[in-house]
Amino acid sequence: MRKVFTKLVFTVLSLGSVTAFAQKNDLGAWYMYFGNNKISKKLNWHNEIQYRNFDAVGDLEQLLIRTGIGYDLTENNNNVLLGYGFILSQPYVNGEKKENIEHRIFQQFITKQKFGRFNLQHRYRLEERFLQDDFRMRFRYMIGLNIPITHKEMLPKSLYASVYNEIFLHFDSPVFDRNRVYGALGYVINKNMRIEAGYMNQIQENRNRGQIQIGFYNNIPFNKN
């Protein structure tokens, strides 16, 4: 199964490279690391790095670093978290690349549900965005689903399907910011690590753009229990 997933990753990257070369800036690529590490029975440390490109590789669109401390209201579920994000963006403006830096405070609540093979997650996030010349607030809601394919549970050495939809809403006008729809195939390496390769379509008011995504997830606990 690992060989099948490895072939999938290389296929996704190859298709992304070819498409980006043929039609510049229409297809981007995001390479992502997500850590969610237990500090104690109730506390967890969230940490992530996302390297986003306009093309498959080599043309930086955004570097995003996020961290935060969360607390489980119930055992391994209903997590509330306070976090900080640093975002370096390099957009093209009239054909010329600019640089913007954003500092972001965010609060979120994640709740998980399980229905047979279906692992459902809801994430509610509020963001206070400190841009270079502006301040904005934004609300995000994501619903995600992981479905094991080769086992009935998300067990080591098993393949799974992953999908999500996330909507972003401003607190001022225009209210709608963007919507993301994602689908991927994942591989559970062991009980604390997994990897995904997929495609995300991002819809904005005047733009619709695809992203190849490769994500690595690390849940190795720091506590002994």
Image (cartoon, rainbow, N blue to C red):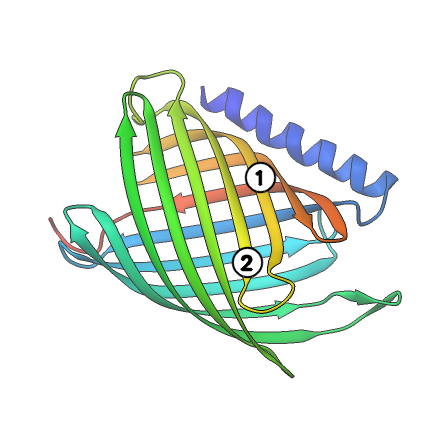
Q: Which mark is residue 169?
A: 2
Where, quadrant-wise, is the N terminus in this rendering?
top left
Classify mark 1: helix, strand or loop: strand
Residue at the location (58% across, 39% down)? 181
| Residue 196 visible | yes
| Residue 224 image position (x, y, % from top left) | 12, 51
The residue tagged 1 is 181
Residue at the location (40% across, 44% down)? 217
Q: Residues within 10 Å of mark 1 (few under 14, many from 20)?
A: some
Give the residue type at disc 1: Val
| Residue 144 image position (x, y, % from top left) | 43, 38
Whether residue 208 is situated above or below residue 64 in the rendered picture: above
Q: Is residue 188 left or right of residue 50?
A: left
Q: CA distance from mark 1 to mark 2?
A: 15 Å
Classify mark 2: helix, strand or loop: strand
Give the residue type at disc 2: Leu
Pick whichever, 128 or 225, lies toward us.
128
Q: Residue furthest bottom?
A: 133
Residue 60 occupies quadrant: bottom right
Q: Which mark is residue 195?
A: none
Q: Is residue 31 left or right of residue 186?
A: right
